[in-house]
Image: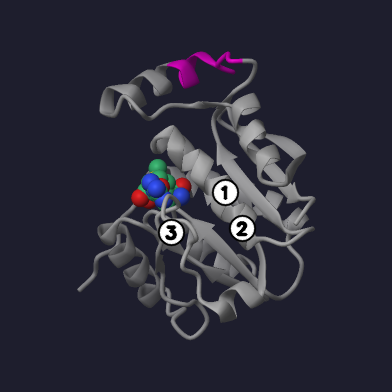
Amino acid sequence: MDKRLFFSATIRNREFIGDVLARIFKKGGLILEIGSGSGEHGVFFQKRFPDIIWQTSDPDLIHIKSIISWIAYEELGRKMPQPLELNVENIPWKVPFNLVHSLQGIVSINMIHVAQWSCTIALFKGAGKLLKKGQFLILYGPFKIGNKHTSQSNYLFDNSLKMRNQLWGIRNIEHVNEEAKKNGFFQEDIITMPANNFSIIYRKVSF
Ligand SMILES: C[S@@+](CC[C@H](N)C(=O)[O-])C[C@H]1O[C@@H](n2cnc3c(N)ncnc32)[C@H](O)[C@@H]1O
C-alpha cells in the first residue's frame, strides 16, 4: 500500500539544499540523514547524487513507512537502503558497522527546531561518536543569531511551533555551536538560504 507522505517545504528547499551539499560531498560513500521525515528529500538527493548511498532514518514509524513507500515509488530499492529507526537520544546510535565504514557525513534538515533541545544535544553527541576527524555534519533550518530572530516570519513560525509543543522552537546559533564544540566540531561555514533559513557545515576536528 502507498504510505507516502508529502511535506510541502521539501519541494521548495530541496534544490537549494542540494546545491550546498554538492559543494561538500565527495564521490562515493554513504550519507546518513537524521530525521528524514517523509523521505522526499532522501529520494531526491539519491537521484541528484547517484555516486553516494543515501541512508535515511527517523524515529517515527509513520515516517519510516512513508520513506519505504517513496523508495519503492521511485524504484530506488536496489540503491537505497531501508530507513533506520533512529532516535538521536538513544546513544550510541545503532548504525550497522558496514554503513559506518563507508560514512562520509551526516545531514539533518529541519529537525532541531521541531524537537526538544535535548535532541540538539543528543544530535551532536551521537554524531561526535560516529564521525571521524574530517567528516561533516550539515544542518539546515531557521536559526536565531545573537538570540534574535532573523525575520518577522521566523518569529511567527517560532510562536506557532511553541503552540504545538512548548519544548520546540527555533534555536540560537551560538547555543548550537557550543554543543558542536563540546563534541569536537568546528563551524566551517554558514550559508544564508532562501526563506530565512541557513545551512551550517560542521567539521569534526578532533577524535
Ligand atoms: C519537521 S520534520 C522534518 C523532516 C524532513 N527532514 C524534512 O525536512 O522534510 C522533523 C523530523 O525530525 C524527526 N525527529 C523528531 N525527533 C527526533 C529525534 N529525537 N531523533 C531523530 N529524529 C527526530 C521527526 O520524526 C520528523 O521526521
Label 1 or label 3, whichever comes before in sequence order = 3
Residue 162 occupies quadrant: top left
Q: Secondary structure at mark 3?
A: helix
* Residue at 60 percent of width and 44 percent of height: 139
Left or right of residue 140: residue 4: left
Rendered location of residue 22, percent (x, y): 72, 57
Q: Which mark is residue 125?
A: 1
As measured in the structure, the alpha-carbon distance from the residue carrying label 2 to the one carrying label 1 is: 6 Å
Is 105 situated left or right of 114 in this image?
A: right
* Amino acid, disc 2: Lys
Along the viewing direction, whichever of 187 and 182 lies nearer the viewer: 182
Asked whether mark 3 lies closer than 8 Å to ligand 1, one says yes
Q: Which residue is the site of mark 3? A: 40
Identity of the residue drawn at 48% across and 27% down: 170
Q: Give the quarter of the image for residue 29.
A: bottom right
Instruction: Describe residue 31's horizontal placement relative to residue 158 as left or right.
Output: right
Secondary structure, mark 1, is helix
Q: 14 or 27: which is nearer to us?
A: 27
Report x, y in % for residue 201.
71, 45
Where residue 92 sits: x, y (%)?
50, 60
Q: Name which of mark 3 and mark 2 comes first in the sequence.
A: 3
- Dot 2 falls on a residue whose secondary structure is helix
Name the residue type under label 1: Lys
User: Colour scheme of this structure image?
Assistant: one colour
Q: Residue furthest bottom?
A: 78
Disc 1 vs disc 3: which is toward the camera?
Answer: 1
Residue drawn where x is 41% and y is 17% of the image: 156
> Cβ–Cβ below 8 Å for labels 2 and 1?
yes
Instruction: State which region is magenta.
Output: 147-155
Pointer 2 residue: 129
Q: Residues within 10 Å of mark 3 (few under 14, many from 20)?
A: many
Pick out the residue farthest to the left: 1
